[in-house]
Image (cartoon, grey):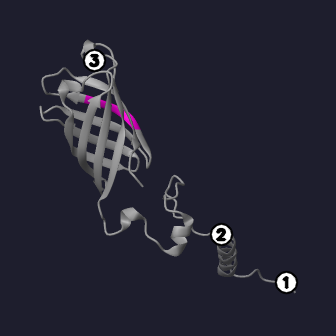
Amino acid sequence: MRRCPPPLYIIASIIAVLLLATAAPFSPADANGIVPKESHAEQAAGKAPANESANAPLASHWAGTSKTLCGPLKTDFRRCNAQQKIKFDLVQTGINLRGTYECAYGNATCRGSQNKGTVTQGTLDGTHLEMVVTTPNKSNCRYRGVLTDIMGKGTYKCVGGSELEERGTWRIQRADAD
């Protein structure tokens, strides 16, 4: 007597059960395989990450340096390789940033002697940072780069005010007192 093969739906059900039984536990990684920064212990305890708690603004303090680039049409030759100490106090709501900027003498004075500014526009989308700092003389400096939980770096370009255009690089580290 010849045996009939089992119906296809039975085979599919058995395969599905076997796959579910051997699958790894769910991990909330994004499409690039990056797991959010909260620990697995926090996930297991059901704690929400800080940036999801009632959409509360997050404040952070940063300190570092900026350095002008040299070359034609990039900066005033007298400011070639000028280095300043910089600080940012940022408040993040969602991906939007606002805050303040401070500049202090490194090996040269700050561009246009502008020691303070306001972050008038800014976004932090993942680690991609873009922000515009406006100084009292109406200069606008656009900062672009990468900002992680502990450090940031990138390029900037300043226009306006009474100075020539200036381009350079910046590096900062988190200065929060934890």
Mark 3, mark 1: which one is toward the viewer?
3
Q: Amino acid at mark 1?
A: Arg
For badge 2, the amino acid type reads: Ala
Question: Residue at 57% of width from left, 68% of height from top?
Answer: 26
Q: What numbered label is drawn on residue 23?
A: 2
Residue 39 x %, y %: 53, 63
* Main secondary structure along the magenta-highlighted residues: strand
Mark 2 and 3 residues: CB-CB less than 8 Å, in contact?
no
Number of other residues with Cα within 10 Å of mark 3, as a class: few under 14, some 14 to 19, many 20 or more: some
Give the magenta part as a residue range: 153-157
Does any portion of residue 53 appear in the rendered image? yes
Cα distance in 3D space between marks 2 and 3:
60 Å
Q: Which numbered disc flags the more N-terminal residue, 2 or 3? A: 2
Q: Dot 1: within a 10 Å radius of its alpha carbon, few (fewer than 14), some, or many (20 or more) residues? A: few
Tell me residue 50's x, y (percent). Answer: 39, 64
71 horizontally vs 165: left or right: right
User: In the figure, 169 relative to 47: above or below?
Assistant: above
- Name the side, left or right, on which 34 lies relative to 9: left
Is tag 2's residue or tag 1's residue first in the polypeptide sequence?
1
Closer to the chain start, of discs 3 and 1, is: 1
Q: Quadrant of the C terminus?
A: bottom left
Residue 2: assigned label: 1
Q: Residue at x 29, y 49 (%)?
A: 90
Q: Nearer the viewer, residue 41 or 10?
A: 41
Q: Who is closer to the viewer here, 52 or 174?
A: 174
Q: Label 3 is placed on what type of residue?
A: Arg
Q: Which mark is residue 79?
A: 3
Residue 146 falls within the magenta-colored stretch:
no
Q: Depth check: 93 or 114 in front?
A: 114
The crowd level at tag 2 (other Cα within 10 Å; few <14, some 14-19, many 20+) is few
